[in-house]
Amino acid sequence: EAGVAQSPRYKIIEKRQSVAFWCNPISGHATLYWYQQILGQGPKLLIQFQNNGVVDDSQLPKDRFSAERLKGVDSTLKIQPAKLEDSAVYLCASSNGLAGFYEQYFGPGTRLTVT
Amino acid sequence: AQSVTQLDSHVSVSEGTPVLLRCNYSSSYSPSLFWYVQHPNKGLQLLLKYTSAATLVKGINGFEAEFKKSETSFHLTKPSAHMSDAAEYFCVVTSNYGGSQGNLIFGKGTKLSVKP
């Protein structure tokens, strides 16, 4: 079974530029998550999708971050414009269902450096 | 509101000695609890999970954890450390109900070092 795919693996941009990350979840997983992991901290949820609908985006900085999952499969997370504090690893995860007892499978992450 | 506190940011053990990584949680509802491991430059991997069944949970690679509701703890243990266990470990809590179900709340992590 193929795992969660993410691209690119690494990205370096200057502040005020824009960037986009892509995630393809495990086949058949309806729930998709984006997490931000700042160096030295645990991951923090940014947004949660169920199929193509947003379940929770309360921690997404909506003035600069956006995410979509138009066909209920793969997803894109965008930052525009980027700030220095956005430097982090962006993790995508997917699961079979919403409830906490469903295991979330994580992708390898995209390491973003903003200079 | 839910939260987790990992009591040690760094634990160092010798190979072959026991491992204890401590975690306390706070949750308004009956929680699900997890331990994840993250090796350098690799993705997060689930070690074990508690979802209101047996309180002693066995995971991969010889790790286990015990859910103690009275102490609000979910400590991770392993009888004998191996060099390959060196990694960052995260204690995680989530709710099975309500608007925040499935939202994993991560602790700050414990870095485990294993000395030969």
Image: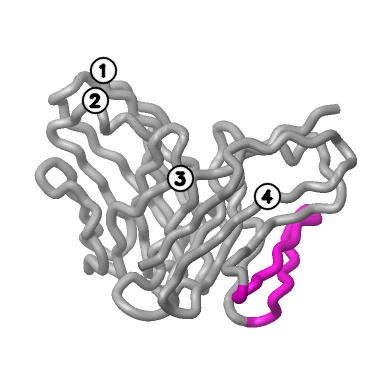
Residue nearest the viewer, comparing A47 with B33: B33
Instruction: Looking at this view, name the residue that lies furthest to the left.
Output: A63
Residue A65, above or below B31: above
Q: Is residue A86 left or right of residue B26?
A: left
Q: Which chain's residue wears label 1?
A: A
Residue holding disc 1? A115
Distance from Cα at disc 3 to Cα at disc 4? 15 Å
Task: Identify the residue under disc 2.
Answer: A84
Residue for point 13% across, 32% down: A81
User: In the picture shown, does residue A75 fall above or below B72?
Assistant: above
Residue B111 percent location from the top left of the image: 62, 37
Between B36 and A33, the one nearer to me in the picture: B36
Distance between the alpha carbons at the discs numbered 3 and 1? 22 Å
Specify few, some or many for label 3: CA neighbours under 10 Å numbering under 14, 14-19, or 20 or more: many
Whether label 4 touches label 1, CB < 8 Å: no
**How much space separates mark 3 and mark 2, taking CA atoms?**
19 Å
Using the numbered discs, state the Cα–Cα distance from disc 1 to disc 2 in whole angstroms: 6 Å
Q: Chain of mark 2?
A: A
Residue beneath the point at 14% across and 35% down = A80
Q: Residue furthest front?
A: B71
Query: Could you say which disc has been placed on residue B65 in the image?
Result: none
Question: In the picture, which quadrant includes the C terminus of chain A?
Answer: top left
- The subunit letter for the residue under badge 4 reads B
Label 4, on which residue? Answer: B21
The label nearer to you, 2 versus 4, is: 4
Question: Would residue B79 be found to the left or right of residue B109 on screen?
Answer: right
**Sooner in the amino-acid sequence: mark 3 or mark 2:** 3
